[in-house]
């Protein structure tokens, strides 16, 4: 299975770097920065799910919405990868129902 990991370069350190380096070898992980995603306005072919780093998502959500990328990102399952234990609600989601707004 192929996964896309949306993470900006400045957040890719420590535990997140070891997450990328130790990703299971029977799956493919493609790392894409928010700027790259905004530039290409598409995801690689054959993607099973999206993994997103929390700070990158929080910082880039408004740009994704403005440039029309949310319909592309909504069709696939989304999982948040964070180095923090307790996670706050994501931008663009209702905290109680975890729905898109």
Image: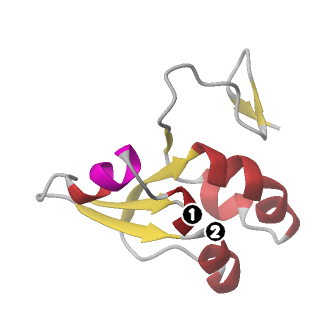
Residue 36 screen position, x and y as percent: 60, 79
The residue tagged 2 is 34
Of tags 2 and 1, the one toward the viewer is 1
Q: Residue furthest right?
A: 66
Q: Nearer the viewer, residue 4 or 82?
A: 82
Residue 25 on the magenta segment: no
100 up-or-down from 74: above or below: above
**How many angstroms separate mark 2 from mark 1 (CA)?**
11 Å
Image quadrant holding the N terminus, namely bottom left
Quarter of the rendering containing residue 99? top right
Residue at point 64%, 68% (across, down): 34
Label 1, secondary structure: give it: helix
Residue at point 19%, 58% (across, down): 27
Magenta range: 15-19
Q: Nearer the viewer, residue 69 or 81?
A: 81
Q: Is residue 8 visible?
A: no
The answer to whether 39 appears left or right of 6 in the picture is right
- Label 2: few (<14), some or many (≥20) within 10 Å? many
Residue 16 on the magenta segment: yes
Quarter of the rendering containing residue 64? bottom right
Q: Which mark is residue 10?
A: 1
Quarter of the rendering containing residue 54? top right
Image quadrant holding the C terminus, namely top right
69 up-or-down from 76: above or below: below
74 up-or-down from 101: above or below: below
- Label 1: few (<14), some or many (≥20) within 10 Å? few
Residue 65 screen position, x and y as percent: 82, 60
Q: Residue furthest front?
A: 14
Magenta span dominant secondary structure:
helix
Residue 44 screen position, x and y as percent: 44, 76
Residue at point 53%, 50% (across, down): 52
């Amino acid at each position: 299975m192929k996964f896309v990991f949306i993470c900006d370069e400045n957040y890719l350190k420590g535990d997140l770097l070891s997450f990328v380096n130790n990703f299971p070898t029977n799956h493919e992980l493609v790392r894409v920065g928010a700027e790259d995603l905004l530039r290409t306005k598409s995801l690689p072919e054959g993607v099973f799910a999206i993994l997103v780093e929390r700070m990158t998502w929080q910082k880039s959500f408004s740009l994704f919405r403005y440039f029309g990328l949310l319909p592309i990102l909504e069709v696939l399952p989304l999982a948040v990868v964070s180095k923090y234990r307790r996670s706050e609600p994501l931008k663009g989601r209702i905290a109680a129902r975890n729905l898109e707004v």
